[in-house]
Amino acid sequence: MSEAIKIQDCTGSYGEKEVLRHVSLTVEKGEFVVIIGPSGCGKTTLLKMINGLVVPSEGEVAVNGELLTECNLAAMRRRIGYAVQGAKLFPHMTVEGNICYVPGLERKMTKEEKKTLTRKMLKMVELPEELAVRFPGQLSGGQKQRVGIARAMASDPDILLMDEPFGAVDEITRKGLQEELLALWQKTGITIVFITHDIGEAFKLGSRILIMKEGGIWQEGSKEELMENPRDEFVRRLISR
């Protein structure tokens, strides 16, 4: 395996408030890394550092061997899918428009190319083709989330970043989305970094789980490693929820 993401001794701040403190992390290509921890521990900041939305005040970030400070950041971001809670679809665009948005930034697409790509992505997330002409306001919560994943995957990214993507849907829909995401990961071999507040979701999805606390990585390992050897009472309480 080779490195998809390397975060080296990074500190991140918002104004005077330090959110991440000297964090180092390596994610290998094809890993499914899940990050869990209390609110304010730096999870989202860490995720945003990976695609350059947050610039570390100290340290450096490399994606696929390229330092973010030395690469074409716009081009790099097109190789990184990003899915968040509630999908955050463009409300004025159809499902097709949302799915084809990022590929359309890279090259001019014909109507037929857009239809073909949309059909392929909807099939990937198990949605019917007829949704292509609908607007986000005409979709259910689960449908919106699936379209959000389809949009994030449409440019055939190397890395998929997901910030609590299933937090706004009901439990039955959430379990279905988890199964679909696992199947998608197994099929494509894409590298995924996924944030959640749900330890059950973390254990179900992650090939490696990072527990964050107070701006740092407190403990990491597989489900079995964390269950068998929790670092302290904080970890024990977290994994027993």
Image (cartoon, rainbow, N blue to C red):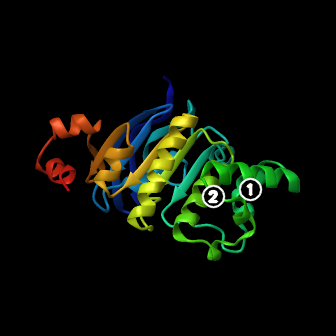
Q: Is residue 233 left or right of residue 145?
A: left
Residue found at x 66% / y 69%: 90
Give the percent coordinates (x, y) of residue 40.
32, 61
Q: What element carries label 2?
A: loop
The residue that mark 1 highlights is 100
Quick one: which residue is furthest to the bottom in this view?
A: 137
Amino acid under label 2? Leu
Report if residue 56 is visible in the image: no
Q: Is mark 1 on a helix, strand or loop?
A: loop
Q: Is residue 93 left or right of residue 79?
A: right
Amino acid under label 1? Cys
Quick one: which residue is furthest to the left in this view?
A: 233
3D distance between C-alphas at marks 1 and 2: 16 Å
Q: Nearer the viewer, residue 130 or 96?
A: 130
The relative height of residue 229 versus residue 108 in the rendered view (above or below) is above
Give the percent coordinates (x, y) of residue 193.
45, 45
Residue found at x 41% / y 68%: 170
Image quadrant assignment for residue 226? top left
The residue that mark 2 highlights is 127
